[in-house]
Image: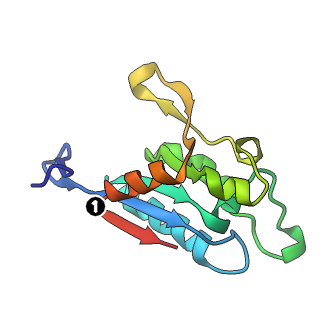
Amino acid sequence: MSDIEAPDAEGGVVKKFMFVNRKSPHGTVYAVESLEVVLISAAFDQDVSLAFLDDGVFQIVKQQDTSGLGIKNFSPAYRALGDFEITKLYVEQEALDERGLTADDLMEIMYEDEDDDYEEKPSVRVVGRGELSKLMSEQDVLLSF
């Protein structure tokens, strides 16, 4: 077992998975497929995190309206990630800056911290490119969408 692998409650090995979201939320299947795979991974008790960079930052922009596109708006599903113990969502600051966005433009995605009397805490963390690169290097598996 490597330093980054840890046994889970049943004695299996927990892997660190990071899903890297680079595409805009609509016009392709990348964003919705990523979300589906994220939820499947969490069902297998893996350590799951998401990174949003490039146009992927648009996936968690609040108040998305897809009515003119004739497709279902799946973005509210991100708010359920905490229920699946997915609490690490990293947004690249430089990607926000390049698109004229700020952290205030992002959805409020919260989770209940069972180690802190179920206090609600934010899942979204805006990080610089260097920090995100470091986080990526610490993963067992990187999947890019």
Extreme-front residue of the structure:
130
* Tag 1 residue: 140
- In this view, the residue in front, 15 or 118, is 15
Tag 1 secondary structure: loop
Extreme-right residue of the structure:
68
Q: Amino acid at mark 1?
A: Asp
Q: Is residue 60 visible?
A: no
72 with respect to 17 (left or right) = right
For label 1, the crowd category at 10 Å Cα-Cα, with few meaning under 14, some 14 to 19 and many 20 or more, is some
Which percent across, then down, holds residue 16? 31, 55
144 with respect to 103 (left or right) = left
Up/down of 7 relative to 72, above or below = above
Up/down of 135 relative to 9, above or below = below
Residue under the image location 63 percent in, 72 percent down: 23
Which percent across, then down, holds residue 121? 55, 30
Extreme-left residue of the structure:
1
Q: Is residue 105 visible?
A: yes
Which percent across, then down, holds residue 26? 72, 73
The N terminus lies in quadrant: bottom left
- In this view, the residue in front, 38 or 100, is 100
Residue under the image location 84 percent in, 62 percent down: 65
Residue under the image location 52 percent in, 54 percent down: 129
Extreme-bottom residue of the structure:
28
Residue under the image location 49 percent in, 56 percent down: 50
- Classify residue 57 by image quadrant: bottom right
Up/down of 84 relative to 26, above or below = above
